[in-house]
Image (cartoon, rainbow, N blue to C red):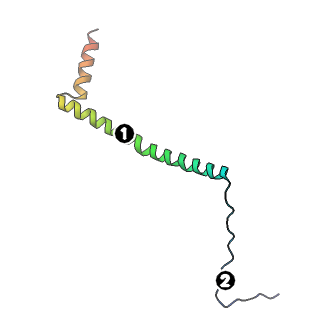
Amino acid sequence: MTTELHEGPLEASPTIAPAKASWREQRRNRRRRRVWFEEILGWILVPAILIGSYWVVEGVLGAVGTSFSAIFSGLTTITSNF
């Protein structure tokens, strides 16, 4: 039993060009990328919109001269009288 020992630089194996994807595979890949992009964008934008909306409401209430706690205490006072 013998083994061949190669002492020179290794040759790169020939690469096989990938077959061109059909139009259905291309469409499926585009849809998959779009769905992933929309999902990631949703996970980023939804919390940002919710936090931003809270800050806007806080700012408006502060500009008017009231707060969430004052509004809730007024509501509890109104409901306790019924």
Mark carried by residue 20: none
| Mark 2 residue crowding within 10 angstroms, few (<14) / some (14–19) / many (20+) | few
Q: Residue furthest left?
A: 65
Q: Residue furthest right?
A: 1
Front-most of 48 and 2? 48
Between 74 and 49, the one nearer to me in the picture:
49
Residue at (24, 27) in percent of width and height:
69
Indicate the quadrant containing the C terminus: top left, top right, bottom left or bottom right: top left
Residue type, label 2? Glu
Compute the Cα span from label 1 to label 2. Answer: 56 Å
Q: Residue furthest top?
A: 82
Indicate left or right for 25 with 69 as reference.
Answer: right
Which residue was labeled with disc 1?
49
Q: Tell me what residue is drawn at x 45 percent, y 46 percent.
A: 41
In the rendered image, residue 45, in percent from the top left (x then y), is placed at 40, 43
* 41 versus 17 height, above or below: above
Residue at image location 22% in from the left, 29% down from the top: 67
Q: Which mark is residue 11?
A: 2
Residue furthest to the bottom in view is 7
Q: Position of residue 44 (x, y in %)?
A: 42, 45
Compared to residue 30, the image places residue 63 above or below, namely: above
Q: How many marks?
A: 2
Q: Tag 2, which secondary structure? A: loop
| Image location (x, y in percent) of residue 37 | 50, 48
Q: Quadrant of the N terminus?
A: bottom right
- Horizontal side of 54 relative to 10 (left or right) equals left
Kind of element beneath mark 1: helix
Q: Is residue 23 left or right of residue 76?
A: right
Give the residue type that dot 1 points to.
Ile
Q: Dot 1, crowdedness within 10 Å: few (<14), some or many (≥20)? A: few
Q: Earlier in the sequence, mark 1 or mark 2?
A: 2
Where is residue 17? Give x, y as percent. Answer: 67, 68
